[in-house]
Image (tube, rainbow, N blue to C red):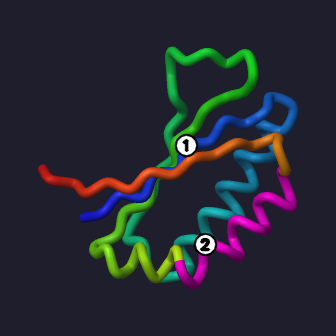
Amino acid sequence: MILYNITYMVAHEIHDEWISWMKTIHIPEMMATGLFDRNQVLRLLEVDEQEGITYAAQFYTSSIENYRSYISNNAPVLRLKANQKWGDKVLGYRTLMEIVQ
């Protein structure tokens, strides 16, 4: 199992709108690709929230091929849409992990 993790720092002034967008638009679009089996969103605790609130959006897929297909065929469009909507009010970085246990 492969875990694609995106960690976001979300500016306070857009937080409520962003979390709603994630739940109703962005995550459903990612799941609609058919390349991920499940997802979850977590809020990081015990972190400095002066500049924003930090979340981890996690997407699980059964194969590295599914992940690569997503990155090649879907990610550019979805990232562009997110960047156009939120600009520098949301900062993100991505990590890829293999679940070993």
Along the viewing direction, whichever of 15 and 64 lies nearer the viewer: 64
Q: Position of residue 11 (x, y in %)?
A: 79, 32
Amino acid carrying label 2: it is: Ala
Residue 85 falls within the magenta-colored stretch: yes
Looking at the rendering, the stretch of residues picked out in magenta corresponds to 72-86
> Few, some or many C-alpha atoms within 10 Å of disc 1 (few <14, some 14-19, many ≥20)?
some
Q: Residue furthest left?
A: 101
Amino acid carrying label 1: it is: Thr
Dot 1 corresponds to which residue? Answer: 7
Q: Position of residue 82 (x, y in %)?
A: 76, 60
Disc 1 to disc 2, C-alpha distance:
15 Å
The residue drawn where x is 70% and y is 46% is 19
Along the viewing direction, whichever of 1 and 88 lies nearer the viewer: 88
Dot 2 corresponds to which residue? Answer: 75
> Few, some or many C-alpha atoms within 10 Å of disc 2 (few <14, some 14-19, many ≥20)?
some
- CB contact under 8 Å: marks 1 and 2: no
- The dot on residue 91 is none
Residue 46 vs 71, above or below: the answer is above
Residue 43 vs 69, above or below: the answer is above
Specify the quadrant that holds the N terminus: bottom left
From the viewer's perspective, is 2 left or right of 89? left
| Element under disc 1 | strand
